[in-house]
Image: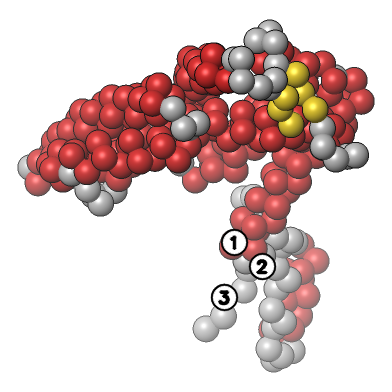
């Protein structure tokens, strides 16, 4: 039996509208089937659709931030950035050339875009955090912030190590090798592409402990499995280094050794993660 809303319900703070209640009472008194009450705005929206709409909005904000920074850098600082990127090589007495009419402009645009993405990183992380924060508990928020900070720190360390140690050593090696044979003249676009690919590879390699932590946390691998494949990891590290670095032993070794050290750190992190999971499982059983 349909219950008629009372007027004192409105006085208690319910969302009934007095006119709607009066119309409903008249329909009941006349023996008519009451109309379905109008839904409040936003209640009929599919939650998945609303999530996608929110994600789309956040992505638009990030793209706008990158676009604005890109325009500002191209307008005022592109040449300075290119000079800064090429300075280590020029200091070795190596000149740059461009082989196509648009190659120099393309190099400036490439450097400007990468710089815009780097400078827009705080905005990007803010919107990523704002999107996922409502779905997290307080303890999950703390863990996720720690996780994101660790990822950023390891990536920055990898980029700094790749550029400051390995890349500069590779430049010195090649200059010394080619000295007296020919005059080095590098293509500006090829140099910039190689530089950013090189340092990005080191940034990704330094995320190995994070990968091990995630895989162990999800139960995909165990510390024992990571230890059992160590000899294959040693071989894979030198193979990967051979593909990602110039063809000299020094650069390959300087990349492979950090990979192996980070893998060992990842094993320790995996052991700690497994211990925490076992303790949590034991607490649940009790």
- Where does residue 64 sit, x and y in percent of width and height? 80, 39
Marks 2 and 3 sit apart, C-alpha to C-alpha, by 24 Å
Quarter occupied by residue 50? bottom right
- Where does residue 251 sit, x and y in percent of width and height? 43, 24
Left or right of 11: which side holds 162? left
| Residue 163 visible here | no
Q: Secondary structure at mark 3?
A: loop
- Residue 66 vs 25, above or below: the answer is above
User: Which label was assigned to residue 44?
Assistant: 2
- Where does residue 142 sit, x and y in percent of width and height? 42, 28
Q: Residue at x 92, y 25 (%)?
A: 75
| Residue 90 visible here | yes
- Residue 164 vs 223, above or below: the answer is above
Q: Secondary structure at mark 1?
A: helix
- Neighbour class for label 3 at 10 Å: few (<14), some, many (≥20)? few
Q: Residue at x 69, y 44 (%)?
A: 58
Quarter occupied by residue 115? top right
Q: Residue at x 54, y 28 (%)?
A: 199
- Where does residue 220 sit, x and y in percent of width and height? 25, 51
Q: Secondary structure at mark 2?
A: loop
Q: Which residue is mark 3?
A: 3
Q: Which residue is mark 1?
A: 47
Frontmost of labels 2 and 3 is: 2
Frontmost of labels 3 and 1 is: 1
Q: Residue furthest front?
A: 181
Marks 2 and 1 sit apart, C-alpha to C-alpha, by 9 Å
Marks 3 and 1 sit apart, C-alpha to C-alpha, by 30 Å
């Amino acid at each position: 039996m349909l219950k008629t809303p009372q007027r004192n319900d409105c006085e208690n703070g319910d969302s009934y509208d007095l006119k709607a209640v009066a119309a409903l009472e008249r329909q009941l008194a006349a023996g008519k089937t009451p109309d379905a009450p109008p839904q409040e705005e936003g209640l009929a929206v599919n939650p998945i659709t609303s999530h996608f709409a929110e994600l789309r909005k956040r992505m638009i904000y990030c793209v706008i931030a990158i676009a604005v920074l890109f325009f500002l850098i191209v307008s005022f600082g592109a040449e300075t950035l290119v000079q800064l990127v090429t300075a280590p090589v020029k200091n070795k007495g190596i000149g740059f050339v461009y082989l196509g009419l648009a190659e120099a402009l393309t190099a400036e645009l490439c450097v400007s875009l990468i710089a815009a993405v780097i400078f827009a990183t705080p905005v990007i992380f803010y919107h990523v955090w704002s999107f996922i924060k409502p779905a997290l508990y307080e303890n999950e928020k703390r863990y996720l912030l720690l996780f994101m900070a660790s990822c950023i720190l390891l990536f920055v360390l990898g980029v700094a190590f790749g550029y400051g140690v390995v890349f500069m050593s590779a430049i010195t090696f090649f200059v010394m090798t080619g000295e007296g044979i020919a005059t080095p003249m590098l293509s500006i676009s090829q140099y910039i592409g190689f530089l950013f690919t090189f340092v990005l590879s080191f940034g990704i390699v330094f995320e190995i402990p994070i990968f091990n932590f995630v895989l162990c946390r999800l139960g995909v691998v165990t510390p024992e499995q990571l230890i059992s494949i160590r000899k294959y990891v040693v071989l894979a590290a030198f193979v990967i280094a051979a593909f990602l670095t110039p063809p000299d032993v020094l650069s390959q070794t300087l990349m492979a050794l950090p990979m192996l050290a980070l893998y060992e750190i990842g094993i320790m992190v995996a052991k700690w993660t497994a211990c925490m999971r076992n303790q949590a499982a034991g607490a649940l059983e009790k």
